[in-house]
Image (cartoon, helix red, strand yellow):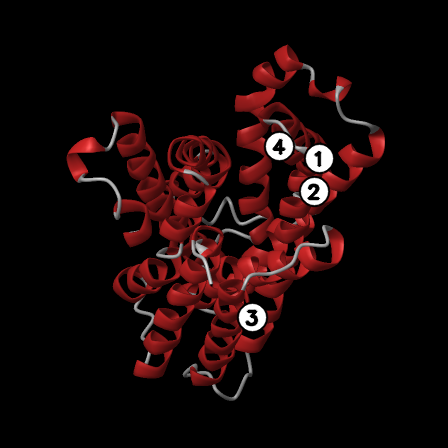
Amino acid sequence: MATFMKHQPISSISDNKLTGFFAAGAVVCIWSTWIVVSRAGAISNLSVFDMTAMRFGISSVIVFPYVLYRKPWKTLNLHKIIFLTFVLGPFYILAVFVGFNYAPASHGAVFMNGLLPAMSLISGIFIFKNKPKLLQVIGSIIILISIAALSFSSKDLNFSLTWKGDILFFIGGIFFTAYVVANRAWRISLAEFFLCSSVINGIVFIPIWYFLLPSGLHLASLNQIFLQSFYQGIVPPLIGLVLVAHAVRRIGSDATSSIMAAVPGLAALLGSIFLNEILNLNSWISIFGLTVGIAATSWSGKLKF
């Protein structure tokens, strides 16, 4: 952030860039609260299948008119549709939701948000033949050390439960990294994303959930149902996506990613406030190190060595 601001006073920043910063800040709040809300839903009377159905069912109904108008199936061949639908589908979402049954919100934020820069760097080296910059390597090393330190500093050091959640979050991170790599290679449009992530997955998953999978809807309160429906079906897959796109257009991907480094810390703070998830000093130090590592990796393209 300091590098971006260095050569221009506050008064010279255009309104467009200000809206970009506001959008990126809003995404940080959305992503952090989604993590906490998802953790709350996973330990509630709702089943993880209910939450997954909300994710695909509600979002697919909302975006269906737009997808029908844009006809993205004309620009995607079958193997791309299958791949994108799979990596953005129930296996990805269920890995995350089930992970919240075992591990706290802070772990979900760290593994899902923290591992992405490191895994993207590795995929860039092997798939796109990128030559990593020094700061990228340093940032990735800091990220991996911080994640390892967080895992071993958990109050559940006996690993009876937490390690299961961490592995599931890691799997979820792999799924999302696969989408990020595909998006970079194929330049996925918004309509193409909605087709695969929401519409097709909604058409496939909702009947399976309704007829075959266990549900806790009848045990959950209306407040729980409304909260999860709003956050799973509308906030991240729709509002969050639009805000990220706006932030990237206005201030660039580096600045947006750097601001997103605040997600693990904010999610951990919200988890401690609303879910009574107590973290020790080592955990907070690990989250701080992770934030520094993500910011360093994200801004590496702007710094010279």
Mark 3–mark 2 contact, CB under 8 Å? no
Mark with earlier residue (2, 4): 2
- Measured in 3D between alpha carbons, the distance from the residue under mark 3 to the one under mark 2, in whole angstroms, is 24 Å
Q: Position of residue 234 (x, y in %)?
A: 46, 33
Looking at the image, which is closer to me, 261 or 166? 261
Circle 3 — which element?
A: helix
Q: Which residue is mark 3?
A: 166
Q: Which residue is mark 1?
A: 186
Q: What residue do we see at 50% from left, 44% from top? A: 218
Mark 3 or 2: in front is 2
Q: Which mark is residue 198?
A: 4
Name the amino acid type tagged 1. Answer: Trp
Looking at the image, which is closer to me, 3 or 153? 3
Name the amino acid type tagged 4. Answer: Ser
As drawn, the residue found furthest toward the left would be 11
Circle 1 — which element?
A: helix
Name the amino acid type tagged 3. Answer: Asp
- Measured in 3D between alpha carbons, the distance from the residue under mark 1 to the one under mark 3, in whole angstroms, is 30 Å
Q: What residue do we see at 54% from left, 77% from top? A: 161
- Measured in 3D between alpha carbons, the distance from the residue under mark 1 to the one under mark 4, in whole angstroms, is 19 Å
Q: Is residue 37 above or below residue 293?
A: above
Residue 167 visible in the current orientation = yes
Circle 2 — which element?
A: helix
Q: Position of residue 285 (x, y in %)?
A: 34, 77
Q: Which mark is residue 182?
A: 2
Q: Residues within 10 Å of mark 4 (few under 14, many from 20)?
A: many
Mark 2 or 4: in front is 2
Mark with earlier residue (1, 4): 1
Q: What residue do we see at 46% from left, 42% from top? A: 253
Mark 2–mark 1 contact, CB under 8 Å? yes
Circle 4 — which element?
A: helix
Name the amino acid type tagged 2. Answer: Ala
